[in-house]
Each structure stands twice: as C-alpha cells, then as structure tokens.
Amino acid sequence: MDLGRFLGALLVISVLPGLVRGGDIVHEDDKAPKVPGCSNNFVLVKVQTWINNIEDDEFVGVGARFGTTIEAKEKYANRTRVFLSDPADCCTTLKKKLAGDILLVHRGHCKFTTKAKVAEAAGASAILIINNRKELYKMVCDPNETDLNISISAVMLPQDAGASLDSSVKSGASVAVQLYSPDRPLVDTAEVFLWLMAVGTILCASYWSAWSAREASIEYEKLIKDAPDEMLNTETTGTSGVVDINTVSAVSFVVIASCFLILLYKLMSHWFVELLVVLFCIGGVEGLQTCLVALLSRWFKRTGESFIKVPFFGAVSYLTLAVSPFCIAFAVVWAVYRSISFAWIGQDILGIALIITVLQIVRVPNLKVGTVLLSCAFLYDIFWVFVSKRWFHESVMIVVARGDRTGEDGVPMLLKIPRMFDPWGGFSIIGFGDILLPGLLIAFSLRSEPPYSVFGYLLFFPWY
C-alpha cells in the first residue's frame, strides 16, 4: 500500500526529535535565587480532596520557594478543611479568622509572600493559590525580600483544579484536603524499559534493512550472471520501494518539518488531533501489515508469493489480504479506546511497526548525507524547543507534544510506558524522531563496509 507508506513516512519524518521535553511548570526563577526564608526546593504536591467526608478528586500542585516544607508521607499528612478567602485575592486583612484551616485564594495583584503572610496572620495552616492559567507556576520571592519567616505551607494549583475546589466550597459542601509530596524512586523502571524498547526497535529495523539490502544484492548478482548483456545496460536504483535521502532533501527536511510543526501549533485542537490519529492509524496499519507479512512468509512462503490483482492497490499477495483485516481492526480498536489505561500497548505496537517500516523505506546512502541530516535535526530540535520561545512566548514543540488546547493527552506520534512504581504516575515517553534518526544511521552502518560501520556506531551514542 504505497499511500499508507507515504503517509506513515511523512508523519514520522515531519514530527522529528524532542516531542517529549518540558512539562507543565512554565515559570523559571533564575532571577530569584534562594535567600534565607525563601530556599525551599520546588516539589510537586498531591492535593487529595474530600467532599462531605467522601473521597473525591486528587489534584497536583507545586510547592512554593517560601514557607514550611510539605509532608512527604501520606499517612502523616492531616486532612484539613478548606475555606474561601475574603477578599478572594488575600491581598488585604481577612474579614474572618481561621482556626488552622487551609485558605483557598485567587492569584491577584499582590505578591505571593504577601498572600501567605495575610493568611498566616488570620490563623490558616496552609494556603492554596489558584493560578489564572491551566499550567503550574513556581512561586518565588522578590530579590529584595530577605529573612522571610513564613511558617505555613503555600501550594499553587492549576486553574481547572482550583475552579473545581472553588465551586465545591461555594456550593456549601464541606471540603477538606490532604497535602503531601511523596518522593520519586531513585530508578525509574519505566525509563529503563522505554530505552530497551527504543534500542530494540532500532536494532530490529537496522538488521532487517541490512538483511534486505544483502538479499537484493545477491539477487542482483544472480540476474547479472543469467543475463549479463541486458543487465549491464540497465541502470539500477536499488531495492524497489526504497527512498534514498540526498543532501538537498536532508537540508529541506528542516523547512518541511518546521512548516508541519507550525501547522500543528496553529491548528492544534480536538478535531486536528483526531486527524493525526487517523493518519497515525493508516501508517500503523501499513507498518503492522508489513511486519506481519515478513514474519509469516517464512512459514507460509507459497501464500506470500501468490498474488492477486486488487483495484487501486495492484498486485497483492494472499498473505497480505489475510493479515490486513486484523491490522485494520487492531488500529480501529486502539483509536476508539485510546483513552483507557492500557491503550499505550496498542499505541506502542502500531508505533514500533510504523518506525520499522519507515526504516525499510527511507535510507541514508552515505556518511555525508547522514552528517547533514543529523546536523539539521540538531538545529531543528534546539530552535523549536528553546529559541521559539522568543517569538511565540512558549516552546512550540513542547506545546504540540503536550497537546495543549486539545483536551487530549498529547499527540499519538510517540512511544509510552506508564510509571507503575512512581507515586506520581504518568508516562515515560519518547518521540518517533528520537528513534528514527539513530535508526537511519545504524541501518546505514550495518549496510556499509568498514570503516563506516564502526564510525556509525560511534556517532550513534551522542545523538541518541
């Protein structure tokens, strides 16, 4: 299916490395160094809620640079009732005294430390500040603030979480929260398995590419011996269906990928992610079908070598027709149920199959092209992750990776594994481009004669 291969290759090559960097904390505090009374490390804080003594949603906030540190153990964290601040921004003296309760305030025009001091003076045990954006914000002190002595904890909540708590309290319900900040494990097992998955995909695709090239070379030599005159006058371009990258295309990829990334950034919405899911499924079906046919043809060789003409697709083997319904059904089921907890398995299977297939189609012909391609990819990555903030006021690549303004958990062009032993949960993820680029180089090195093979392996590690 040439259409599926084309869409899959375009999808993977356009959305290149670095789709998974960054996070939801957007504020940097380089201009606000640690000072006495304002020297806490920034930590994520779990905010478990109870509505009318019934356990409800759990939100995630970020602790402030000032105030007391957050309890790390859930069993030692107290469940404390929440009250709304009056005035709402907590910038002036409160109209009502508290008795060790937690104060919920809106981000206003005064400093964070001012809010904390006012809340502390009113008898609050902690303060929850609702951000005016959906991201988290690092609460720091002004450079001229020294020797602060704030003895309550301060936590920033994203806008949606704060709005939920605010509406619950305003409805008259009894709202209580428990604040604690569990430590992450020293070794993230998900990262280890993700690394093994990525390296395994590269090795599989690279050895398959080298084996295919070797088989094509042997077949060509046989044809030369059988019909030397005809073959000597025939110009060959290599294996059918293989696209060799040249220097011009390696440079122009930066422009194409940048345009595609801007398109994603500007049109990022729920319907646009749905379109990406459709394209990902088309490429995934083709990739899964290619891999299954290659594996099954060893046991069903006659079926794999028997063809039938199909309208639009041309000559298709019986084995391809047999596995196609399964591949299509697999992709459709994943697309429909991609929001459930274990849908990452289907996404990884489709993604790995797609990457392996693309590495069979797109090839680096020599070391010069490989060097130009990786250099362009490096500049592309640095620009859209870091430099783009100057023009767009946010990292374009990070916004696209997170799937902002879509209501979705990021774009589908990545591999992911859940952090099963991490109290914070979430996923460890890696973009397709971070696998594809080393794969192109390793596949080239395996197809080449020494010394390029050794040199290719040496180049692999710093880029990966």
Image (cartoon, grey):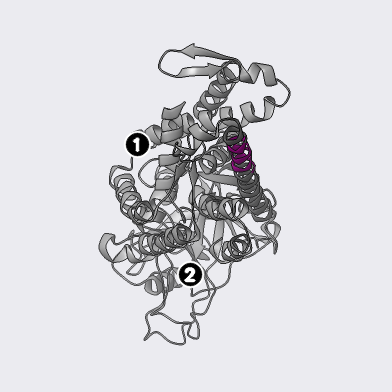
Query: Badge 2: how crowded within 10 Å, few (<14), some, or many (20+)?
Result: many
Q: Which amino acid does label 1 sit on?
A: Phe
Q: Is residue 139 above or below residue 413?
A: below
Q: Which mark is residue 109?
A: none
Q: Which of marks 1 and 2 is nearer the N terminus?
A: 2
Q: Which quadrant holds the C terminus?
A: bottom right
- Describe the element under mark 2 as helix, strand or loop: loop
- Marks counted in the figure total 2
Q: Identify the image quadrant of residue 86.
A: bottom left
Q: Main secondary structure of the magenta part?
A: helix
The stretch of residues the image draws in magenta is 211-221
Nearer to me, 272 or 282: 282
Q: Mark 1 points at which residue?
A: 272
Camera sees residue 163: no
Q: In this view, does 309 lie above or below 107?
A: above
Q: Return the x and y of residue 116 as percentages of the image width and height.
A: 43, 70
- Tell me what residue is drawn at x 54 percent, y 61 percent: 44
Nearer to me, 220 or 225: 225
Q: Residue 64 carries which label?
A: 2
Nearer to me, 335 or 352: 352
Q: Which amino acid does label 2 sit on?
A: Ala
